[in-house]
Amino acid sequence: MVSLNTSNTMTHDDALRVKPGHRVESCGYYGTICYIGEVPPTKGIWLGVDWDDPTRGKHNGTHEAKKYFTTRHSTSGSFVRLEKVNLGRSFRAAIRNRYGEVKNDDTAGIDKENLAHLQRGIKARFIEVVGFDKVNKQQSQFEELRVICLRGQNVNGPGEEGELLQVCPNIQELDLSQNLLHSWQCLARIANQLRHLRVLNVSENQLQIPPQPVEYQGSFQSLEHVIMGRMEYVWSQILDCATMWPFVEKLQVPFNNITTLDAPPEGILHHLKSLDLEGNLINDWREINKLGQLPCLEYLNASDVGVKEVYFPVCETEQKTRLFPALKQLNLSRNNIDSLESMNELNKLLLLEELRFHQNPVLQDKSAETSRQLIIARIGNLKNLNGAPVTTDERKGAEIDYLKKHSEVWLREAKLSDVTIHKPILDKFIQTHPRYPLLVDKYGAPGEEYTARKFSTNLITVEIFSPDHGGRSYTKKLPQSMQVQTLIGMSQRLFDTTTVIPKLAYISSKYPDIEFPLDNNLKELSFFSIEDGDSITVRW
């Protein structure tokens, strides 16, 4: 907690509006004023600033053994003169600066820095822009503005009482990210004049929360969507703020300091349909489950939160969980999930239809196609995976392949399941593959004759010979799943190459004059499209 102290009275006229807790900017760095007064032996008034970026400061608020203010980091504090910092401007002044009409300027309304970046990127000496002067003229009619972006405009407050209601009363979407607003009270004085405000972005602001935030509920009655990224809030502070937004439906709080969660109190976030927790180091899925009673939550972004598994307690394997009763879309990308059992758990969600699951360890050694099939087969209601629709044919193929892959174990254990000693083994199989019995009912059990046929059709008959050593040859039936390194070992034994490792190639019966090297020891024979009647050459 930053301490706020005042000492003496500043003589500079502009300093009269500066108070501890206010925000300042200097050379792109943002900080909070924590002290105003003299710092002996120097003369004049200093501002003691706690900078957001600790590398911008020099100390912890102490000068010559005297503590003037407390900082959040040991090196984030420094003393600066008033004239060295930007105190910001009013909301109205920022709108005029950003959207005011500019005469005789074809680039009015364009971000000059972005335009220069584009010019450098395409190596153009000149860029002609057309029509932006008309856009600028239209935007300068403030009362017509519906969407306003004032990011980085150093807004410090609403300005004169009631002037926003007169100047820009129809704003519906407002971006106030990275400004000099210092409290929710200040923000409420802005929102109170914008009766149609639905979307509010206050990311990258250090906003103090009032002791009784619910008292400001009237200022945010129309608010439906709030964005609060990188504000260093914990979850309890998010809940405190939420008492101000009685009808919020979409909440984004990415990259804050949220490590634990709690169920919202009765009436708080009761209408919430979408929640973004990306980048908060929560780590434990049990914390996520604390939000499971939100009755309307349809979308949850839990990407990059550090969880290793997904788990829903007090739920039999084949049943659906009562948690997250409305959840349809879930983002679990960039986590540490390392077991397929988490896929089984996701199948317990009653309405889950869309999933994003990029960059998790459990699938890192599998191809994108194989990973997709595994997920689709294990989650029955999935209609969209990683942004791509799951078609009826794709689901059928994934589920049948899943049935075939585990058919031998299923047939063996199902046949012995009437014997008491084997019952636990079958139960364990079903626990690992909870959808398997359902898929058997859906498509029918793969019979023993199928398993035998599958094995026989997986074999290919090839001739293995050594053209450089007398032309010895052997006819062998090999499984297509055999790896090249296994075939090398077999060839060493057949041709007695002792410690010399032979080089293999195959000759297709369709192209008898061409040898194709088997140059990847870890690949299966099927990778090289070897067929019945082909030949394998062995050289050493």
Image (spheres, helix red, strand yellow):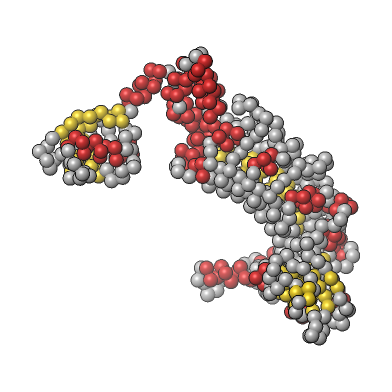
Q: Is residue 488 shown left or right of residue 317?
A: left
Question: In the image, residue 8 lies at what x, y percent?
Answer: 88, 78
Residue 400 coordinates in the image, percent (x, y): 47, 27
The answer to whether one can see residue 95 in this image is no
Front position in the image: 4 or 228: 4
Q: Residue at x 53, y 29 (%)?
A: 432
Quadrant in which the N terminus appears: bottom right
Which residue is pictured at 57% across the width and 48% down the height? 334
**Farthest residue, direction front:** 65
Whether residue 226 is visible, yes or no, is yes
Q: Residue at x 79, y 57 (%)?
A: 171
When the figure is inspected, residue 88 is found, relative to residue 493, above or below; the finding is below
The residue lying toward the viewer, choosing from 228 and 250, is 228
Q: Residue 71, how many percent across, how many down?
A: 74, 67
Vertical relation: 276 (above or below) 83: above
Looking at the rendered image, the quarter that the C terminus falls into is top left
Q: Position of residue 39 (x, y in %)?
A: 80, 80
Q: Quadrant of residue 128?
A: bottom right
Q: Image quarter for residue 404?
A: top left
Residue at 69% across, 58% down: 230
Q: In the image, 222: left or right of 514?
A: right
Q: Quadrant of residue 466?
A: top left
Horizontal side, residue 408 vs residue 279: left or right: left
Q: Residue 226 or 67: which is nearer the viewer?
A: 67
